[in-house]
Image (tube, rainbow, N blue to C red):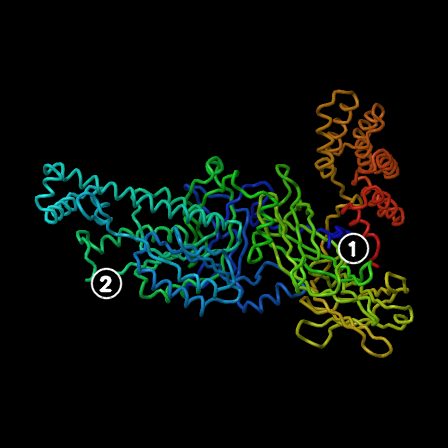
Amino acid sequence: MRALLACAAAAGLISAVAAQAPPDQVPPSFKAGVELVRLDVRVTDSDGRPVRDLKQSEIDVEENGASRPVVFFQHIEGPTESYAEAASHTVGGEVSTNQGAPRGHLYVFVFDQQHIAPGNEQRARAAAQRFLQTRFHPGDRVAVNALPGPGPQIGFTANAQQVAAELTKVRGLAQPTTRGPLGGMQVDEAFQITRGSDEMLRRVELRVETELGSDAKKQAGNELTLKAIVKEDALAIVKTADAETRRVLGLLRDMMRQMREIEGRKSVIFISEGFYDDNVRRELEDVAAAAAQSYSVIYAVDVNRRESDFTVNEPTGGDQATGILDRVGPLAGLAAETDGLFANDAGLRADQVFASVAAQSQDYYLVGFTPSDNAVKDPGQYRRVKVHVARSGATAGTRTGYALVDPASRLDRRQAIDRALAAPFPQQGLPVQYTTYLLRGAAQGMQRVILSLAADLPLASDRQSRSADVVFVVRSAADGRIAASGTDTIALPEHRDQAATTGTGMYRVQFELPSGEYLMRAIVREPGGLVGSADRRFTSRALDGPALATGDLILSSTRGELPVRPTAYTGDGLSGVLAVYGRTPDQVRDVRITVDLAPIGQQTAVTSGTADLQDVQPTTGGVIREARIELALQSVPAGTYLVRATVTSGGETAAQVVREVEVRAGRRPPVADESIGSRSFDPRLVVNGALARQYATGLQSASSAGAAAAKKGLERLAAADYPSAVSAFQTSLSTEPQNASTAFFLGWAYHGAGDDRQAITAWRRAAFVDPTIVPVHLALADIYVRLSQPALAIQALRAGLAVLPGSPELLDRLSRIEPPR
């Protein structure tokens, strides 16, 4: 079902502006449009335990000896409970969030078939199968890739049984010995010869002479030519080996790049006998860069056989131990570059190695910093950084560097959102939390669901879009079909939260659903590309049946607010509303509602009261009776409580609804009012708005006297010189009386000057000339509310909706003035 993009049941938009932290504790702000590099940093104490209370001021990122500004700091804490328990809190609770959300490990088994001798893959393959059967949890996801193929290529799945079955197709393809014109030569020998080892060159020469006798002399012609042929053979073997290695590393790089839009650390278990890195160091750096871009940690597993095999009849000129050491060096390097582990000689202990990967902590910090200018100019280049922690005994573990994604290869907005919708777990790039409220719907058999969402977002910046994308999809839990969806935007916050780099963006929307169980995913994407998402399971219960029914309890310390997490203050008290539904007036006439406030986990109430029941009103499918709740909190200690509203009728309990609320000491702090009713009117917010920018762009190409006056009017309005702004806009209108935008800004100039009567006249003029300008109707509605004329405010909004019936802004403001019905 298509979502009705309208905010519901709130009589005033409240956006919290936190008190400023002391100057020495204020972190840099994260503003929209800032290029951001993120590192996942594990911080442990001297005993190896995760440090869970690190502050942003305690961490420093250094590149080329210079500190980089840290503008994003987030603690990702793995659930300490089971997957099911975490899901009950973060997916099935009152508030859904991606912080501490149930997410298991993301495992990627990569078999480097090109560099595993036939048969040597069997031990690791069997251990991987046992791992999937015994250590794989319901919340985990696994992928498997056999490089270069043929072999299994499976994306992330929860079907461990399928993956275990496919592992039987993995095969070792390495051939340690190749044949040249003068006989066999090991790859190890070839690399030593090309490195300039005279000893190895002579050893191979002697072996060739022994094997071929006089034929060697005949084929070579003389000793000098024999050396040249051996060197030529060695060079050809090295080039072939390098090409095979480049192919594998390229496939590994591309595989990890494809995972960069899937949030969360990926444990890439790379199983190989290793390879020589003499000529592939750039390719290894590309792999490290791809790992950095995709948050992949490489656990390199060495499956070389060290025991002697007397059945093998191959040349043994190269030292076996030295050859293995050379080949596994690059494996250890990849592990070190990505903050992973290298398991040396792991063939006989693969079970233990895989178990240690599963035991790695999911507790880490996302640290975002601004890259250097050189990195921006040369994206894709791997750049090394160091991370320091200013806490005694603490150690930081992270990858050795980063590489920016080339702008040409970045996903666009739609692709990024689609990836987030299909991701195996909620994405934690941006903290997101939301809840739902259930009321009776407008159509028979339908319920109105109100989604209230909050997200940590970068601060608004003139360099970028001033809004973030928000998308939600609701699916039936029974068959997975889409029941509702919506796409909209959230205005970026102007102010950051206390001691934070980001601010809070709020969003609300309503849609209708039939009764049933539903699964929802909400996604928020800020202009720079960071994404956060959260899952929710909820029930749409029937509210128009024959029995008495109630909507959800709406609590706040300001009437009409629809908070994600209700908060009340002891000095202000707690207010709320509860809708009671029935078929007939008689059914709700003798209803009584008592309200208790009890600490979480306790039955004894610390305060109680009785709801004030309003008159019975007709509604779709029956009647509604609204109950208004007021509770004094002066004697209530701060803490988290459960509000329980019990509905009785005829002496029997008809319904009981509950909701958590956080009680804080004191009074609610001052808030910034975005409407024109604010006493601290800031004209810069008007002049920097989208409509003003569009208006100013049009004036740039105009050369009339009216355009010149309008330019001056905008300049004077921004400077809060209201009399001059009024005069300039009036001059402009005298030459271009049909310019609705000029009349709109004239209204703001009048408002700034304190003449709201003239402001209303100017805005009415603008609405008459061009009724499609949404901000005009909003300005009129807000000023009428300020003048205690809600009926006129509703009239102004309905006039706008007559022309723009689907406007989310007008529907939002109307729903915040009219009480829910």
- Where disc 2 sits, the SS reads loop
Left/right of residue 738 with respect to residue 340 in the rendered view: right
Q: Position of residue 814 (x, y in %)?
A: 82, 50
Q: Earlier in the sequence, mark 1 or mark 2?
A: 1
Q: Are marks 1 and 2 in contact (CB under 8 Å)?
A: no
Q: Nearer the viewer, residue 687 or 375?
A: 375
Given residues 351 and 432, the one toward you in this image is 351
Figure quadrant of the C terminus: bottom right
Name the residue furthest left.
Answer: 214
Q: Which mark is residue 650?
A: none
Comparing 737 with 662, the one in front is 737
Q: Secondary structure at mark 1?
A: loop
Residue 801, horizontal then vertical, whole percent = 83, 45
On the image, numbered disc 1 is attached to which residue?
A: 10
For marks 1 and 2, give the one nearer the viewer. Answer: 2
Identify which amino acid the numbered label 2 is placed on.
Glu
**Residue 391 figure quarter:** bottom left
Residue name at image x 42 percent, y 51 percent: 399
Kind of residue at badge 1: Ala
Q: Position of residue 80 (x, y in %)?
A: 53, 67
**Residue at numbered disc 2:** 307
Apparent side of residue 730 relative to residue 369 in the rendered image (left or right): right
